[in-house]
Image (tube, rainbow, N blue to C red):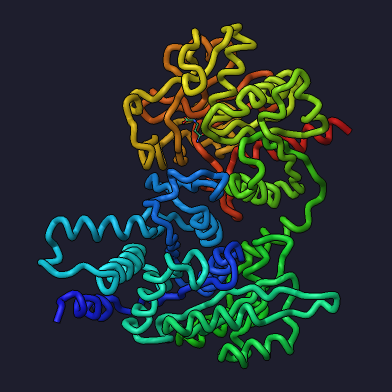
Amino acid sequence: MDETFYYHNEMANARGTMKFIIVTGGVLSGLGKGITASSIGRLLKGRGLKVTAVKIDPYLNCDAGTMNPYQHGEVYVLDDGGEVDLDLGNYERFLDIGLTSDHNITTGKVYKTVIEKERRGDYLGMTVQIIPHITNEIKERIKKVGEASGADIVLVELGGTVGDIESMPFLEAVRQLYRESGGEENCLFVHTTLVPIMGSVGEQKTKPTQHSVKELRAIGIIPHVIVARGVKMLDYDIKRKISLFCDVPLAAVVSAPDAESIYQVPDILDQQGLTDYILRKMKLDLPRSNMIKWNAFVKNLLNPTGAVEIAVVGKYTGLKDSYMSHIEAFHHASAEAQVKVNLRWLEGEDLETKNPGKFLKGVDGILIPGGFGDRGIQGKINAIRYARENSIPLLGVCLGFQLLVAEYSRNVMKWKGADSTEFNPKTRYPVIDILPEQAGVTDMGGTMRLGTHDIKLIPGIVRTLYGGKAKIQERHRHRYEVNPKYIDKLDSSGLKFTGRSKDGVRMEVVELANHPFFVATQFHPEFKSRPENPSRVHLGLVEAAKAYHSKKK
Ligand code: GLN
């Protein structure tokens, strides 16, 4: 018999007590599976368990780095520079952990490895097949990530919907994982489905749930818990019906109704006894939860004392998921500043008029987020100028940082046509230019300046926001930078570079003297924002917006 059939049973024996919770989705995508999984993780963490997460994306891309935010939402960046699915952001935020690119498994990654092994001759002449070679590779990756993180619980979220052709090898792999790990004590299946409401009587319909569970069972997976998404809590009769038809105990049918905030979901699930149920099933006897700080955050978030309006001038505003980490960073800052943050979404292109102020009228702050390509650039520059001239708090991030430098160069330094060479390679004043190591790079995947780098701060607004720290670490994703040729002139004219890379070569933070809050960062502070520890600069913008708002009155 083929050796690979034995191999994984050995791994399972060596693994010890690591347990798995596998979250699948039925009926349709976009149900909030990631939030369900993250919430379960947060609850288990509250009971003292060490939890980590793996997101499986059944698409063929090796990672999300080459994906259009318009189709797929934001590309989330990890400490190690991994460009991953935005769901990893939810796990980092809910669990307050740092993940690596190994925590995002895609079909592309799995097949690439298996094909490379085949080419090397690692399979010793065997026929290489989906079962066991692809499925073994999947299981191995899940286990390796779990082992490396030393977690008690590995949450595995399987992207897509049960029944999709491309999910099949992954479902088969987790089915095997269940068997090999010794059953439900060590491996639990949570299935998320939709319970729609039909007709004028508002009846909750269970048929889609029944069908997707049937589909799962056909592959050999019997769900232990069903989380039903819907507008409202499930009626008792509907719960009973799902329990009966899908063969799960009543206590394991849980409602996940629409909530005002995603951060309420852990509590909604916990109130229905889900944490206790999971712990009982997995034979874990643990004390009551400690969610004090989390609950305080949620309470602050839902009970603001005032409101500010912040404009986001972007390029992908039609799909809000493109800016998910910014939206969440504003939620975190909002709770801390105890003020509601309303976002006004503006397309850069719309502001390419003589009177951009028309669109920005009444806002208390402006964010210019990151982006690529030249659509809407002039509109963003117009917004930056408007903020500078009218003393409106402004935060620029990455592309926003670069455009702030370009705007200042054009309109204050009077360097006519100053630009980034990304948009105008022939400009007389290339104030933003390609990073030297990036010139000549043609591959698009994983080639930017990525991930966490050290930043040195000198005294200024941003250093104060970071509690006076002289050294911070933040995440990056860019190909262009401030052209070193112009730094001294800009700095001595009042546009202060108060943050630089460790070697002093890359500009990381810029702020303007004589303006209440005109700040930009080459790094992306939104990726490390956490409910209990918000991005310092988003908080700075919100506080400045609050001050601006109260002065206006
Ligand atoms: N396009 C710019 C660059 O590559 C900005 C990137 C970004 O905003 N993430 O440098």
Q: Is residue 228 above or below residue 62?
A: below
- Nearer to the camera, 306 or 215: 215
Which of the 4 quarters of the picture holds residue 115?
Answer: bottom left
Tell me how many marks there are.
0
**Residue 187: percent from the left, percent from the top?**
42, 80
Q: Quadrant of residue 112?
A: bottom left
Q: Quadrant of the N terminus?
A: bottom left
Q: Could you say where residue 300 lies in the image, as x and y percent from the top left?
A: 73, 56
- Which residue corresponds to the image point at 51% horizontal and 84% vertical from the top-left? 224
Give above or below for 523 relative to 209: above
Identified at 50% across, 80% down, the residue is 215
**Image location (x, y in percent) of residue 275:** 57, 79
Q: In the rendered view, does 543 fall on the left or right side of 43?
A: right
Against 92, residue 254 (above or below) is below
Looking at this rendering, what residue extends furthest in the right direction? 553
Quadrant location of the C terminus in the rendered image: top right
Residue 515 visible to an observer of this rendering = no
